[in-house]
Amino acid sequence: MLADTYGRVVALGERECSIQRRHQKLIEEAPSVAVTPALRRRLNEAATAAAGSVGYLGAGTIEFLLAPTGEFYFLEMNTRLQVEHPVTELVYGVDIVREQLRVAQGHPLRVHAGALQPRGHAIECRITAEDPFNDFLPVTGVIRHLQPPSGPGVRWDGGVEAGNEVTLFYDSLLAKLIVWGDTRATALQRMRRALRELVIVGLPSSQSFHLRVMADPEFQRGDVDVTYFERVGQRLLAAELAPELAQPLAIAAALLAEQQRTAAAPPASAAAAPDGPSPWLLVARRESIGG
């Protein structure tokens, strides 16, 4: 939600953040498959009333717990942007960071509640330096090679690059991989493709877990709640990797082997000139600017 100095408070819909491990969010979506338009109106009204009653200013996030009966309960308010704010930006077409800065400068909000309707569906996977097959323990090491995904509807909010060292002194989050599609099914397809394209060499990450979740029938049906990880997490991690899920790991292994093979080779006399952006990346850029 956003609130300005002129008393205007606007709620930007809801995000579904039920897939968690030890109360840490792993996957987020907007809009939620569990929220109807009528329920969305009630959530927005409750959120704006809460923020308005305390004279809130800036960007913030109010968390609710939805019961099977349709009732919802206030949990807390985070007086800041959250990690998963990109899914809201993609679905509502609002640059929340820019609006937050404008509000801080005393400008009125350019966002009007009546014009805000969710468009399409967005999914975010948190790519962390954790080993899913060792109880998600944080790992350290040097990122030897990083190939982020690209293409239409794909957004990569990365905090690292090849050559960076991942240490124990910071949060394990490496990047956020976000996709948008005109339907949830399209967003799922794009996320599976983006996860297959992602290559991280040098240390384990949560990539393999996210690939398995995207292929899980329960997740595809939208059958998710706060017990999802406890119910299906071990089953997903114990399952044999499908060929399409094993492909990124094979690519990473091949890249690491090639890097080790050429590490001792003498440097070339001149570096080859880059070929420029791929056609796939150019399509994504054209789509993002609407032309």
Image: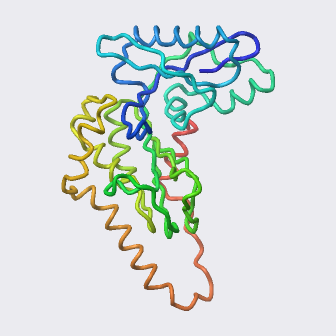
Picture layout, residue 64 above or below residue 93: above
Q: In which quarter of the image is residue 272?
A: bottom right
Q: Which of 241 and 99 is in front in this view?
A: 241
Picture layout, residue 208 above or below residue 124: below
Which residue is depicted at the point 40% across and 8% down? 38
135 lies left or right of 25: left
Picture layout, residue 264 above or below residue 116: below
In this view, which residue lies farthest toward the right?
Answer: 105
277 lies left or right of 227: right
Q: In which quarter of the image is residue 26?
A: top left
Which residue is depicted at the point 34% across and 31% down? 184
Q: Which of 49 and 195 is in front in this view?
A: 49
Q: For the N terminus, which image quadrant?
A: top right
Instruction: Give how far across and how far down residue 42 sits, in percent.
Output: 46, 8
Which residue is depicted at the point 48% across and 16% down? 74
Which residue is depicted at the point 27% across and 60% down? 246
169 lies left or right of 126: right
Instruction: Give how far across and how far down residue 235 sits, in percent.
Output: 20, 46
Instruction: Give how far across and how far down residue 204 sits, in percent.
Output: 40, 61
Instruction: Give how far across and how far down residue 248 sits, in percent.
Output: 34, 61
